Image: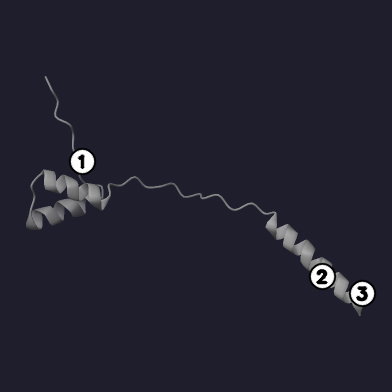
């Protein structure tokens, strides 16, 4: 009877050390670089948009349908 208990205990120890040795899986997904809601709201404020125009702009901006604000070209 003690022989079975010792074998069972050894089996648990071996199985536990095998699973602990597995390295964690690396993330495989690549991040999507869409504008954030915060940056889109900042741009809408800079453009002084209000109401429906602001809502539509922020919606399009977060979907990536608008161009990022371009700095003014100096001549």
**Is residue 75 toward the left or the right of residue 4 in the image?**
left
Q: Earlier in the sequence, mark 1 or mark 2?
A: 2
N-terminal of the pair, mark 2 or mark 3, is 3
- Give x and y (percent) for residue 22: 67, 54
Q: Which residue is mark 3?
A: 3
Residue 5: x percent and y percent?
A: 86, 75
Please name the residue shown 17% across and 31% down the image.
Answer: 71
Residue 53 lies, in percent from the top left, at 9, 53
Mark 1 vs mark 2, CA separation in Å: 64 Å
Answer above or below: position of 74 versus 14. above
Mark nearer the viewer, 1 or 2? 2
Among numbered discs 3 and 1, the one appearing first in the sequence:
3
Category of crowding for the residue at label 3, using alpha-carbon neighbours closer than 10 angstroms: few (below 14), some (14–19), many (at least 20)? few
For the point 14% across and 54% down, the residue is 56
Furthest toward the bottom, the residue is: 1
Given residues 6 and 31, the one toward you in this image is 6
Position in image of residue 33 (x %, y %): 34, 45
Which type of secondary structure does the marked residue at label 2 adopt?
Answer: helix
Cα–Cα gap, marks 2 and 3:
10 Å
Q: Is residue 27 left or right of residue 22?
A: left
The mark found on residue 16 in the picture is none
- Which residue is identified by label 1? 67
Image quarter in which the N terminus is found: bottom right
- Label 2 belongs to which residue? 9
Kindly state the secondary structure of the residue where label 3 is placed.
Answer: helix
The residue positioned 8% from the left and 57% from the top of the image is: 51
From the viewer's perspective, tell me whether residue 13 is left or right of residue 43: right
Secondary structure type for disc 1: loop
Residue 11 occupies which quadrant of the picture? Answer: bottom right
> Badge 1 local density, few (<14 within 10 Å), some, or many (20+)?
few
CA–CA distance between discs 3 and 1? Answer: 73 Å
């Amino acid at each position: 009877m003690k022989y079975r208990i010792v074998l069972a205990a050894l089996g648990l120890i071996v199985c536990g050390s095998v699973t602990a040795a597995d390295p964690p899986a690396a993330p495989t997904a690549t991040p999507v670089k869409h504008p954030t809601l915060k940056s889109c709201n900042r741009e809408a404020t800079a453009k002084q948009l209000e109401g429906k125009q602001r809502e539509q702009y922020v919606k399009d901006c977060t979907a990536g349908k608008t161009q990022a604000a371009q700095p003014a070209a100096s001549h």
